[in-house]
């Protein structure tokens, strides 16, 4: 594995909201210019909601046989014109034509497999990197747009959620480092790759975070900066908790758990490459570059609060499986989990007793076949409409955290239906009704974050 620290290189990733229109792209160009001496590699998402718009255009072509890409075309061409990049349209127009050809193919043959969907979604990132590179060039920087497959991103063929293959650890630095050394600023598509057969794949929604951490880790970069539209990783989803605050530092494990258990801010697998190499991650706000952001580091900093952040994931099913045979616990659990593995259904939380097991999974899974299979050895009851609330923090203080969380739920009249402490030792999760999740997150946030500020303000106010 190539792990020589390439000390003078920084990977910067800008998400869709950071490159949504001409104004945003100019703002990003200023951020890039301010650090250009550090030798940069940029990784970009598609502009704004382009990925959603591509999905909509695909669905329209597939279901109604109509080709409609006016909004996508307008957004990209108008952005270029607003940035004064008319001359670079030569790179964008052929891609738009290729996209039109694809949509027209989908509309005629009415085929939209996962493989075709990945090809369709790839246009968002392929368009955005070309516009950004042209903008940086117009400002005097030696930028050049690249598709991820030209810089060593090889994935498996699990379309719509592909995994990056091991050989990319060698291929990416082989291709990227010579460019950086000769003074080029590569602007690289996030989210997409090609499989061994040369077919375009995507790494799952939000996958540009993973592309960026992979590029940084594989090249031994000094740092990776992930630029968002919020001041870093916040103590809760700002759409649920209005006064959520940026967290100064979190560990890789904590960031990964937060992402897995519902915080949209990072792709769930994004921390994996950095965990291998220890590459420091900085999450920053492109709308507010002066804010310090969140540092993601290998191990917890001393003096950190017991709880880092609270998150929730809705649309969860709770499955109770009770053995109807006199199987010992070993045989029973082995049968249950091998059934889940065969059906490729991933389980999040588990609680077991000698003859029963309760577990949670995403409601999107179709459980009918599994239920039939398990009914040979167990009775299976499925309860939908649940949510997982997760508290990420220092599980060495789990008794205190659990006591406070249970007190809050009791106060709200919310019944906790299942509890588990993650094996990674950084999360405590519990199940409540879907409809209760946001209220629970808000109340826990008050308890763990707002209350901690009371002594300070009482001390400051002083006279009453
Ligand atoms: P990008 O396009 O830059 O990848 P995303 O929209 O994927 O950005 O992720 C950023 C969004 O994640 C924020 O705007 C915020 O609404 C949401 N979010 C949810 N939970 C959190 C959290 N704990 N901290 C920060 N942002 C969060
Ligand atoms: N554009 C892709 C998405 O919207 C990937 C990303 O933004 O990271 O999911
Ligand atoms: Mg994202």
Image (cartoon, rainbow, N blue to C red):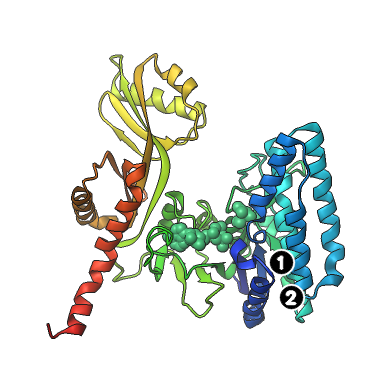
Foreground tag (2 vs 1)? 2
- Horizontal side of 323 relative to 459 (left or right) equals right
State the residue in front, 262 or 322: 262
- Horizontal side of 69 relative to 214 (left or right) equals right
Residue 59's label in the rendered image is none
Residue at 66%, 42% in the rendered image: 156
* Residue that label 1 marks: 187
Residue 136's label in the rendered image is 2
The image quarter containing residue 126 is: bottom right
State the residue in front, 366 or 104: 104
Residue at 52%, 71% in the rendered image: 285
**Marks 2 and 1, the one that precedes in the sequence:** 2
Residue 37 in view: yes
Callout count: 2
Residue extending farthest left: 464
Q: Residue 327: horizontal and vertical position, in percent?
A: 30, 17
Up-down relation of residue 217 to residue 428 (above or below): below
Indicate the secondary structure of the residue bearing disc 1: strand
Q: Residue 196: horizontal and vertical position, in percent?
A: 73, 43
Residue at 82%, 41% in the rendered image: 104
Residues at discs 2 and 1 in contact (Cβ within 8 Å): yes
Ligand 3's quadrant is: bottom right
Q: Residue 315: horizontal and vertical position, in percent?
A: 43, 40
Mark 1 Cα-neighbour bin, 10 Å: few <14, some 14–19, many ≥20:
many
The N terminus: image quadrant: bottom right
Q: Residue 154: horizontal and vertical position, in percent?
A: 69, 49
The C terminus: image quadrant: bottom left
């Amino acid at each position: 594995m190539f792990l020589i620290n390439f000390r003078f290189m920084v990977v910067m990733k800008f998400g869709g909201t950071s490159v949504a229109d001409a104004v945003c792209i100019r703002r990003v160009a200023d951020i890039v210019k301010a650090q250009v001496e550090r030798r940069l590699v940029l990784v970009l998402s598609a502009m704004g909601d382009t990925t959603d718009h591509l999905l909509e255009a695909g669905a329209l072509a597939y279901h109604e046989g109509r080709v409609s890409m006016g909004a996508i075309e307008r957004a990209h061409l108008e952005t270029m014109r607003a940035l004064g990049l008319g001359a670079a349209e030569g790179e964008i127009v052929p891609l738009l034509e290729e996209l039109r050809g694809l949509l027209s193919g989908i509309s005629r043959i009415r085929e939209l497999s996962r493989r075709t969907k990945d090809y369709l979604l790839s246009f968002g990132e392929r368009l955005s990197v070309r516009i950004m590179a042209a903008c940086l060039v117009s400002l005097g920087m030696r930028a050049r747009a690249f598709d991820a497959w030209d810089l060593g991103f090889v994935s498996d063929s699990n379309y719509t959620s592909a995994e990056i293959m091991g050989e990319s650890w060698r291929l990416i630095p082989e291709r990227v480092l010579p460019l950086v050394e000769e003074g080029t600023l590569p602007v690289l598509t996030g989210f997409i790759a090609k499989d061994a057969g040369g077919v375009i794949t995507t790494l799952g929604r939000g996958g540009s975070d993973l592309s960026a951490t992979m590029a940084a880790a594989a090249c031994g970069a000094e740092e990776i900066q992930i630029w968002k539209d919020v001041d870093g990783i916040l103590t809760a989803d700002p759409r649920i908790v209005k006064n959520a605050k940026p967290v100064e530092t979190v560990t890789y494990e904590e960031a990964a758990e937060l992402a897995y258990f519902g915080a949209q801010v990072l792709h769930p697998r994004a921390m994996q490459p950095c965990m291998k190499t220890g590459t420091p991650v900085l999450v920053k706000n492109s709308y507010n570059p002066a804010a310090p952001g969140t540092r993601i580091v290998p191990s917890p900093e001393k003096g950190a609060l017991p709880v880092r952040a609270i998150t929730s994931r809705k649309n969860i099913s709770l499955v109770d499986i009770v053995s109807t045979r006199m199987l010992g616990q070993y045989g029973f659990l082995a049968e249950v989990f091998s059934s889940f593995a065969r059906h490729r259904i991933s389980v999040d939380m588990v609680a077991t007793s000698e003859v029963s097991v309760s577990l949670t999974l995403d409601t999107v899974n179709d459980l009918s076949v599994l239920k039939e299979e398990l009914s040979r050895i167990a009775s299976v009851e499925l309860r939908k409409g649940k949510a997982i609330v997760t508290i990420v923090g220092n599980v060495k203080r789990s008794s205190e955290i659990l006591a406070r969380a249970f007190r809050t739920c009791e106060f709200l009249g919310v019944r906790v239906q299942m509890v588990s402490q993650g094996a990674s030792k950084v999360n405590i999760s519990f199940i409540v009704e879907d409809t209760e999740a946001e209220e629970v997150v808000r109340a826990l946030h008050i308890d763990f974050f707002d209350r901690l500020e009371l002594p300070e303000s009482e001390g400051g106010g002083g006279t009453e």
